[in-house]
Amino acid sequence: MKTLWTTTMSVAMALGSSVPAWAVDTSKTYSSGVLIALFLAFCALLVVVQLMPSVMLLVGFIKGLARRTETKAEVQTASVPKS
């Protein structure tokens, strides 16, 4: 039984690998021109321009949190009496 299974799988793999791909040739189907490329580039530019202020805001929040934790640490160490 095991040899039949091995033989069947070997034949299936050999036949499966020798068949050409059934995919569609996209060079004929999706022949988009320069205008489509320019439109997509413009959309990408809009996304990047919208991300820049949000990244700057996020960096400001992180800097503010870092300063706030440093200030709290300085206040706590300053309020501890030295003996």
Image: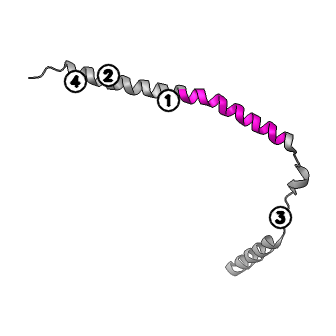
Mark earlier in primary sequence (2, 3): 3
Measured Cα–Cα span from mark 1 to mark 4: 27 Å
Q: Tell me, yes or no, whether the highlighted magenta stretch contains residue 27.
A: no
Of the numbered discs in the image, which one, if any, rests on residue 21?
3
Q: Quadrant of the C terminus?
A: top left
- Residue placed under numbered mark 2 in the picture: 71
Amino acid type for the residue under numbered disc 2: Thr
Q: Position of residue 11 (x, y in %)?
A: 77, 77
- Identify the element where label 4 is drawn: helix
Q: Are marks 2 and 3 in contact (CB under 8 Å)?
A: no
Q: Position of residue 81 (x, y in %)?
A: 14, 19
Residue placed most toward the observer, 76 or 45 = 45
Q: Are marks 2 and 4 in contact (CB under 8 Å)?
A: no
Q: Position of residue 48 (x, y in %)?
A: 66, 34
Is 25 on the left or on the right of 57, as rendered? right
- The magenta segment is 36-56
Q: Residues within 10 Å of mark 3 (few under 14, many from 20)?
A: few
